[in-house]
Image (cartoon, helix red, strand yellow):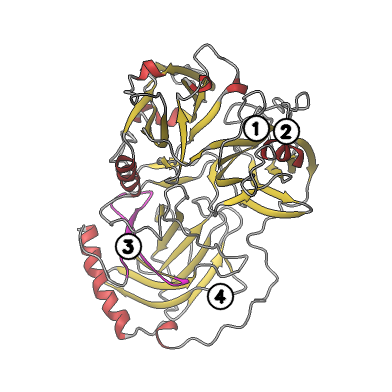
Amino acid sequence: MTAQSSSFPRYAFMPSEGNPEDGAAVFWSVDNDRVHFALAVKALGWVGFGISEAGGMLGADMALYKTSNPSNLVDAYVIEGRSMPLTDDCQDWTLEGATSENGWLIVEMSRLLDTNDGQDRAIKHDADLWVPPTRIIAAWGDTDMVSYHGEKKARSSIRIFADHSNELTEMQALLKTLEEESDSHFDFLEDKFSIPAKETHYQNLCKTVNDFNIELPQGGGVITIIGAMPIITGETAEFIHHFIVYAQKDCTDESTLTRSMIYGWAPGDEGWALPNDVGFPLFDDVNNQALHLEIHYNNPYLIEDMKDSSGVRLYYTYAERTHRAGVLAVGDPYLSLYGESIGEGLTQYAFTCPGACTSSLLGKERNGNNQGITVVSEHLHMHKTGARMTSEVIRGDEVFHKAVADVYEFDNKVSTTRMNACLIKIALNDSTMLSILGAFNVPQDFYTVLPGDSFRTTCYYKDGTAFGLSSQEEMCINFVLYYPAKKTADGKSWTCPYNPEDDFGAGCAAELDMNVVGDLGRDFGNSSGKCVKPAIEALTGSETGQLSSATNEKRVTLFFLLLVMFV
């Protein structure tokens, strides 16, 4: 595809879950603080478009259009699974135009990037490859009223602010960036490993620098990891719950306390790149002369004779970057609650890492204003009975920062929308649906943690099971990617887990507060029954659905693009 509209410079095709040849075409542009979308589907009656938190209908901010009421666009939201969308108290979507002809329904709409409305999803700047893309959904039908759509639905992830060509998928853009910025790469893979016929198995593989046959630079052994791409065997993709890559001293070191996490993958993650001044140095001291790959296989139906060769491709440079990255795990990363049952109803587990921990680790720099750390991203992790998760940074008595997965869904799926042409070797088709499986990358800006700040990681469960290692059991972990990396006095990676028997030598032991709660305390979807925001000026012209000549011009271009995309 080479054609594109000057009004809508970016577009993507979202294949239907039931028929990859059918689907929704979405076009978009950003104009200052406003985002414009056009959605085109083969439908006669209605179409819905949404900005989703986790990639599904639950927790989505939606716009609904019906041909039976052609001058009206309804701002709606969904807070409970499989329920009909509820009408927002404030109507923030603007209908810019609509047409229905030749079996096509095209709707153009716009809204502020951030409406400051608790029933809307703020659209974050998502151009940088270490920031999660914007998750979108669509559904459509031929009836007069919005109703159950069956397989006439689609979902995907797009980068609204990206400037790369429409000819590149998101994965291809990531691959292009990594190849341009790296000096080389190496693969860390299993070799036809026989997946055991049991529900949960953790497979561990370790290799040293010599095993990888890496050509190290003259005069020094250091390389810097700047990004990664997963390599997944298509036939065994459904069995891989996640994998983690660690750096460690050597392959005889079996202690989890001496490992430093570099990269974690779960289905739905298409790859990873660090900011251009941040990296993970390898082979530069005695504590990181080996890499450890831990793969969690989930085989609940006890299927036999499955061979897996999955793993990761790691991209590196010979030059060291300005900042050394680290991963801080908070909550219960060592699963000290293993085997403990979670009660029926709604239960809250809050893990607090005290301010003494950051004072101990960050206060040692003694170099003026550069004592804090910069947080790049956070990945919130629970399993099937997890309903909501938050991670707060508390400074003094105030919550300074809050990362939220308001409508946590473990088994959600997102479409790769023709993104598997690179390294993810899924032996299916170009619209493969991949489960996110409990790895929620929070859309947010960088922020700074200072000495004395505390972390509070809170997981909410609905009709929970017990804490454990399998996908059918529960966890509560926040993986915080930050720089510069910190070590404890005895050289261990910085962590602050819940462990009643050990403070890890730096006062870094989290405290647990468990409560049965009456509700999930969600921020999204609260309703007062009326719009309490400032009054919006009356809309006229094309804003009320009357097509202007400029909108008609855009329609012609959109029809041309549809021919290019579908024919």
Between label 4 and label 1, give the one nearer the viewer. 1
Left or right, 553 with respect to 294, comes to left
Residue behind mark 3: 10
Residue occupying image coordinates x 59% and y 47%: 408
Q: Estimate the spatial distance between the alpha carbons at disc 3 and disc 1, rounded to whole Å.
A: 41 Å
Q: Which mark is residue 495?
A: 1
Look at label 4 and name its amino acid. Answer: Gln
Q: Are marks 4 and 2 in contact (CB under 8 Å)?
A: no
Left or right, 106 with respect to 48, comes to left
Residue behind mark 4: 91
Say if 402 sits above or below 439 in the image.
below
Q: Estimate the spatial distance between the alpha carbons at disc 4 and disc 2, rounded to whole Å.
A: 46 Å
Look at label 3 and name its amino acid. Answer: Arg
List x then y, in percent, for residue 459.
68, 42
* Image quadrant containing the N terminus: bottom left
Residue behind mark 2: 508
- Dot 2 falls on a residue whose secondary structure is loop
Q: Estimate the spatial distance between the alpha carbons at disc 4 and disc 1, rounded to whole Å.
A: 44 Å
Q: Estimate the spatial distance between the alpha carbons at disc 2 and disc 3, rounded to whole Å.
A: 47 Å
Look at label 2 and name its amino acid. Answer: Cys
